[in-house]
Amino acid sequence: MPALWRLTRTETARRVYDALKARGLTATQMDEYVADADAADTDRDPPAGVEIRALDPAAATRFEARYDAFSELRDDETAVCAFDTGGGERDGGGGENGEVADSDPVGYLFLGDPGLTYHVHPLEADVTFPGGYVRRVFVAPEARNRGIATALVSRAVAVAGERGAETVHALVARDNRPSQWTFESVGFRVARTRAYYRAGPWRRRRVKPRS
């Protein structure tokens, strides 16, 4: 029997979920993963031919044409991106915010500074994270299963630590095993589970600490 996440993490399942939500029916459970910035694995190298760079929002806006998610990038966030260098297409600029010529990322995530508040749509609630917050982890289908996501998360923890964050947080749906494996491999642990249920006017929220 296939793993449950292979049935639920599909476009069809997403459309069903969205349709039910539009009719007032929602059941969401998300694990809040936490890593200590000084204890997590921040040395995960990307695969050969891939370069990971941290870009400020101004430098990352050029990727909106390919990835709609970049239109959501906040001014107080950093885009940690993976580039397939292939033939080494670069403009020669140095530093974290240098350009990568004629290249879109094959993977990315967004990293928020410590203490920011986010509206988490699946939970229909605002959540404030005391440490850095990782969201929107994505790797293009043709680049998956190469360790890129793990390297992105590892770099995000390193960047957060450099900016004074003691902890780094992420919210992962309970059925999203690939993301869970990625965070766990870097040293994240589940600190609490956030649940939200809605049926018409009835609502219930629950935060359950995990040992």
Image: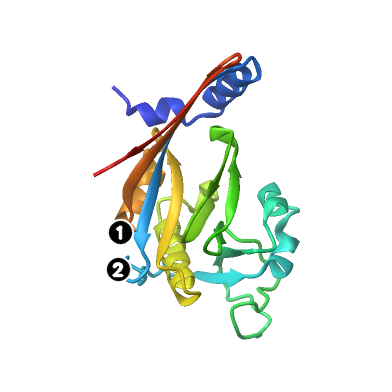
Q: How many marks?
A: 2
Left or right, 183 with respect to 152, comes to left
Crowd around label 2: few <14 · some 14–19 · many ≥20 (10 Å): few
Confirm or deny contact between disc 2 and disc 1 (CB under 8 A). Answer: yes
Residue carrying label 2: 39
Q: Which mark is residue 187?
A: 1
Residue 28 appearing in the image: no
Gap between marks 2 and 1 measured at Cα: 8 Å
> What secondary structure is found at the residue carrying circle 1?
loop
Left or right, 211 with respect to 105, comes to left
Type of amino acid under label 1 = Gly
Decide: is 122 above or below 13: below
> What secondary structure is found at the residue carrying circle 2?
loop
Residue 8 appearing in the image: yes
Q: Where is the C terminus found, in terms of image quarters?
A: top left
**x and y percent of residue 152 in the render?**
47, 62
Q: Where is the N terminus found, in terms of image quarters?
A: top left
In the figure, residue 104 lies in which quadrant?
Answer: bottom right
Type of amino acid under label 2 = Ala
Crowd around label 1: few <14 · some 14–19 · many ≥20 (10 Å): some
